Amino acid sequence: MITFIIIILFIMNIIALFSIVLLYMRQNRLVDMEQKQRKMIAEMEDVISSYLIEMKEENEKFISEIERRKSSGRKQHSDNPAADAAKSNPPHEHEESAVVQEFHYSRKKAAEAYAKNAEAKPQLPKTKKEKEPLHHEVSFAEKVISLKKQGMTVEEIAEKLNTGKTEIELSLKFRQKNQ
């Protein structure tokens, strides 16, 4: 009878040890998952902060460019005071109107290009056999990946594709996470 109880106790000890090991492994998985999430959150915060810094720099460049144009417009007007007196608009209003006209011109030009592009697109086929694409267009992400595989740096890729470094970095990070 004592041997039977010892065998039962031995089996219960083995089950208890197995349960403890199993719970320990689950706890470690949870801790690992939390660490991965913290790391991912830190990466996301870094990407967003770098994006915001890049936006701030671009805004500062834009503001300095506007100020430079305003000051160059004022210098032109101040060189000829008689012409300035003859005009009813102050120099800064004239410069602002030139910037607005330039904006409308570029907007009009973009609208024309868009209209030409819309006219040039062929109509989509209606049958299933004809729904295959007529030609393969390379997406932005595919271009980025291709250039990265060629050994180009993020800055070089951004310069070549006329986009920001942050956009390239985001595209590469999303690609890494999807694979």
Image: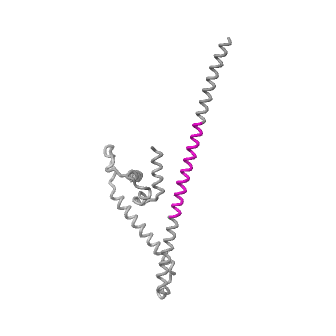
Q: Locate residue 145, reporting x and y percent.
A: 40, 51
The stretch drawn in magenta includes residue 39: yes
Q: Name the colour scheme.
A: one colour
**Residue 55 at x, y = what percent?**
51, 61
- Along the viewing direction, whichever of 174 and 132 lies nearer the viewer: 174
Instruction: Write down the quadrant of residue 128 in the picture.
Output: top left
Tell which residue pokes out farthest to the top in this image. Answer: 1
Q: Residue at x 37, y 63 (%)?
A: 113
Residue reaching furthest bottom?
82
Task: Give the left or right position of residue 23, taking residue 147 as reference.
Answer: right
Number of marks in picture: 0
Q: Residue at x 41, y 67 (%)?
A: 108
Give the quarter of the figure containing the N terminus: top right
Q: Main secondary structure of the magenta part?
A: helix
Establish if 37 lies above or below 71.
Answer: above
Is residue 34 positioned above or below 171 on the image? Answer: above
Residue 93 lies left or right of residue 130; in this view the side is right
Towards the viewer: 110 or 54: 54
In the image, which residues are magenta? 28-57
Q: Is residue 175 above or below residue 108?
A: above
